[in-house]
Image: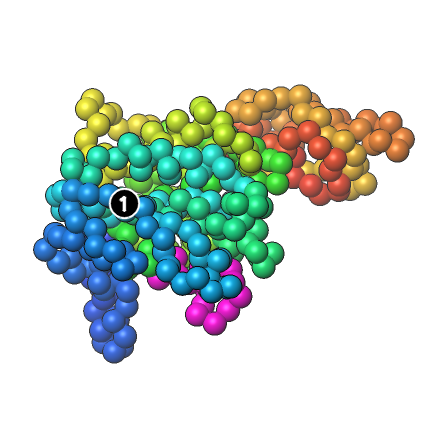
C-alpha cells in the first residue's frame, strides 16, 4: 500500500531530526539540522536577497566577480510559497549538454504561482553553467560534476561547485528531483532512476507519474546517490538526447515535476490519480562485440520490446564493408540507445529494461 505524502514527509522529518541530534552531540550542527527545525513560515535569505512568502525571483548564487568566480556564475530560482510546506529542490544541467533538462526546470518555475504555493520550489537550473554555455557535458576542468558530490572546500573546480550545491541543498530540501537527458550521442526513453529500497524516494518516483522506473542506487559521487545518503529522498528523471529541445520530453518532464509538487501537497492538480508506472528492477547493456567496431545503424526504435536473439541493428566496418548484425542476448524493452555513429569494441548500443 502506498503511504500518503504527509506520512512520508513526517518520516523524512523524523529521520532528519535524528541526523540533527547526532550532529549536535558531535558538536557539529549539521546542515540537515537547520531544515529539520522549521521556523515560523516567513521570508528567507538566498544569496543575500530576502525572498518574501508569496513571491518568487531569480538570483545569482554569488556576487563575486573574480576570475575563478565564473565557474559559479549561475542563477538560483526561488518560489517562496504563501503558505508553509515542504521544499522541493530541482537541479538541471549538471551535465552541460543536457538541454531538455534545463528547459523543464525553466518552464516549471515560470508556471509556478508563488501566491498559491504551499512550501518552496528551489532550483539550480544549470548547475554546470560553463558547460551549459559551451554545450559540454563536463566541467571547465574536464571533470564529470555528477561524480564529484558531495565535493570539498579545497578541491578541484568540480569539487568546489559540488560542495557549494550539496551544502546548500542539504540545508533546504525536503526532496530532490535531478533532471537529465542521455549524453554522448545517446538517447533515453523517459525514465526515473531511483533506489527502490528507499521507500520515500520510490514514492517520489511513482508519483512523478510519467515514464518508467529503473531501480538502482546511482554511482558514487552522483548528486542523487549522495543526497539520499544524507537523508533526503531523491530521484533522477532522464529523457531524450543531448543538445536538443525535444518538446514532448520537455512537456513530460514538466508534468512529472508538477505531479511531485501535487504529491508533496505543494500545489493541487485537480483530478490527479496515483499513477502505476512500469518498474524495471534490472537493466542490461548490449555492447559492440570485440573487434566489431564500425558505423552503427539501429533498426529498432526507443521503447520497442525485444525477444532473446532478435535482430536490433548492425555495425558495418567502413574498412572492409563487413556487416556485423547486433542481436539481443535478453528479452526486454529498449530504454536507451546510441544514435547512428562510429563505435568501437565494447561501446554501449542499447540499454534494456529486463524482467
Ligand atoms: Zn546527465
- Residue at 28%, 52% in the rendered image: 173
- As drawn, 35 above or below 281: below
Looking at the image, is 25 positioned above or below residue 302? below
Res 288 → quadrant: top right
Which residue is found at the position 46% from the left and 31% from the top? 190
Task: Name the outermost residue toward the right.
Answer: 320
Residue at which label 1 appears: 57
- Residue 20's x, y, as percent? 23, 66
Q: Position of residue 163 (x, y in %)?
A: 42, 63
Q: Residues within 10 Å of mark 1 (few under 14, many from 20)?
A: some
| SS assignment for the magenta stretch, majority | helix
Location of residue 351 by image quarter: top right
Q: Is residue 317 left or right of residue 197?
A: right
Q: Quadrant of the N terminus?
A: top left
Q: Nearer the viewer, residue 58 or 300?
A: 58
Residue range of the region highlighted in magenta in the rendering = 151-167
**Whole-percent x and y of residue 218?**
47, 50
Q: Kindly identify the residue that appears in the image at 23 percent across and 57 percent down.
A: 45
Does 46 appear in magenta? no
Amino acid at each position: 500500500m502506498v503511504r500518503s505524502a504527509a506520512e512520508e514527509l513526517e518520516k523524512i522529518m523524523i529521520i532528519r531530526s535524528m541526523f540533527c541530534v547526532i550532529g549536535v552531540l558531535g558538536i557539529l550542527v549539521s546542515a540537515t539540522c537547520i531544515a529539520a527545525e522549521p521556523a515560523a513560515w516567513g521570508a528567507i535569505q538566498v544569496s543575500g536577497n530576502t525572498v518574501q512568502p508569496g513571491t518568487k525571483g531569480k538570483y545569482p548564487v554569488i556576487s563575486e566577480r573574480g576570475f575563478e568566480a565564473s565557474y559559479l556564475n549561475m542563477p538560483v530560482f526561488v518560489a517562496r510559497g504563501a503558505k508553509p510546506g515542504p521544499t522541493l529542490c530541482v537541479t538541471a544541467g549538471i551535465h552541460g549538454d543536457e538541454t531538455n533538462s534545463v528547459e523543464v526546470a525553466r518552464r516549471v518555475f515560470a508556471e509556478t504561482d508563488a501566491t498559491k504555493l504551499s512550501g518552496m520550489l528551489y532550483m539550480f537550473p544549470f548547475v554546470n553553467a560553463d558547460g551549459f554555455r559551451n554545450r559540454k557535458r563536463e566541467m571547465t576542468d574536464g571533470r564529470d560534476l555528477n561524480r564529484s558530490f558531495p565535493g570539498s572546500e579545497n578541491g578541484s573546480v568540480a569539487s568546489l561547485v559540488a560542495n557549494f550545491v550539496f551544502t546548500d541543498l542539504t540545508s533546504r530540501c525536503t526532496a530532490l528531483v535531478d533532471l537529465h537527458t542521455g549524453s554522448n550521442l545517446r538517447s533515453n526513453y523517459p525514465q526515473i532512476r531511483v533506489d527502490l529500497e528507499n521507500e520515500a524516494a520510490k514514492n517520489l518516483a511513482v508519483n512523478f507519474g510519467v515514464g518508467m522506473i529503473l531501480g538502482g542506487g546511482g554511482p558514487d559521487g552522483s548528486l542523487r546517490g549522495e543526497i539520499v545518503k544524507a537523508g533526503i529522498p531523491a530521484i533522477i528523471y532522464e529523457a531524450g538526447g543531448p543538445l536538443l529541445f525535444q518538446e514532448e520530453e520537455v512537456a513530460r518532464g514538466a508534468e512529472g515535476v508538477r505531479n511531485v509538487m501535487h504529491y508533496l501537497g505543494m500545489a493541487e492538480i485537480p483530478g490527479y490519480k496515483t499513477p502505476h508506472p512500469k518498474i524495471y528492477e534490472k537493466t542490461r547493456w548490449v555492447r559492440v562485440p570485440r573487434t566489431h567496431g564500425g558505423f552503427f545503424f539501429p533498426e529498432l526504435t526507443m521503447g520497442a520490446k525485444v525477444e532473446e536473439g532478435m535482430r536490433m541493428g548492425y555495425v558495418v566496418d567502413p574498412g572492409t564493408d563487413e556487416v556485423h548484425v547486433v542481436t539481443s542476448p535478453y528479452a526486454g524493452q529498449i530504454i536507451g540507445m546510441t544514435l547512428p555513429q562510429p563505435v568501437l569494441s565494447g561501446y554501449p548500443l542499447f540499454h534494456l529494461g529486463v524482467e
